[in-house]
Amino acid sequence: MACWKKALAVLGIAICSGMFLGSTYGSIIITSAFYGSYVDNDLQFQSQTGSSLNGGIVFASIPDISSSFSYSVSDSGFFLQTNLQRDGLEFHRAWASSNIHFTPQNDVAFTFNGSFTNLDGWGVVQSSIDEILEDGVASIQMTSLSNDGYWSFSIVPTSGIFQAGHNYQFTSSFYTWVWPNNVDDGSTATGFLSLQLVSVPEPPSLLSLIIFGTIGLFRRRVTFRSRGR
């Protein structure tokens, strides 16, 4: 009895400890998350950051410049959205960024897509999905788009599989600013990135195949005996 009590106590400690290693959504464990909003007018700088594993919104502003960034998560995936505003003076800028680390508990299919629109000045959207290895990272998807003036772009959807037990990171950044030695009429930039997740059905185990095969064989024998009678 003492051995059983000790084993149960150890198991309880392990379970309780595991509960604090991250937040679980369906087949995904989020181990860390960081997202931030930033504004700068060459004289003033402000930032607001968050690290909630459940998502949230961060907002930073100084006169005529603002950055809003939201991050939501569910068992169907991650959704990032930003709204940036700035005036048209030289070096004035607004941007947002995020970094999410997660581990699938079983194989998960993903579809990545997004878009970005910048009304004026220099705009940039960047994102990457990487597998974290012992000696570095292996890139799965990367987007880096930039342009001057008005532009709008939709990211071509990318699909793939996250493997169970592997560690991954999903990073993003959005920018709008006035190019050096230039002025414009100010700008509003909006963007979103979506990483949709769907669990991949596990193949039947050897045990289940044996069980179903035995049941099928038993049914056949019963049928043959009934016909023989």
Image: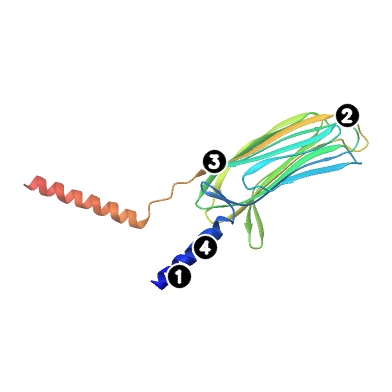
Q: Is residue 87 left or right of residue 172?
A: right
Q: Amino acid at mark 3?
A: Ser
Q: What is the spatial separation of the Cα atoms under label 4 and label 3, in whole angstroms? A: 27 Å
Label of residue 72 in the image: none
Label of residue 6 in the image: 1
Q: Is residue 187 above or below residue 47?
A: above
Q: Kindly check if marks 1 and 4 are in contact, taking CB atoms under 8 A apart as contact.
A: no
Q: What is the spatial separation of the Cα atoms under label 3 and label 1, in whole angstroms? A: 39 Å
Q: What is the spatial separation of the Cα atoms under label 4 and label 2, in whole angstroms? A: 58 Å
Secondary structure, mark 4, is helix
Q: Which residue lies under the disc numbered 4?
A: 14
* Mark 2 burial class by Cα count in 10 Å: few <14, some 14-19, many 20+: some
Q: Amino acid at mark 1?
A: Lys
Secondary structure, mark 1, is helix
Q: Kindly check if marks 3 and 1 are in contact, taking CB atoms under 8 A apart as contact.
A: no
The quarter in which the N terminus is drawn is: bottom left
- Position of residue 187 measured from the top left corner of the image (x, y, whole percent): 81, 30
Query: As drawn, which residue projects farthest toward the top?
Result: 185
Q: Is residue 225 left or right of residue 209?
A: left
Q: Which residue lies under the disc numbered 3?
A: 76
Q: Nearer the viewer, residue 78 or 4?
A: 4
Q: Which residue lies under the disc numbered 2?
A: 184
Q: Quadrant of residue 131?
A: bottom right
Count the labels in the image: 4
Q: Earlier in the sequence, mark 4 or mark 2?
A: 4
Secondary structure, mark 2, is loop
Q: Is residue 107 above or below residue 135?
A: above
Q: Amino acid at mark 4?
A: Ala
- Position of residue 62 measured from the top left corner of the image (x, y, whole percent): 85, 36
Front: mark 4 or 2: 4
Q: Earlier in the sequence, mark 3 or mark 1?
A: 1
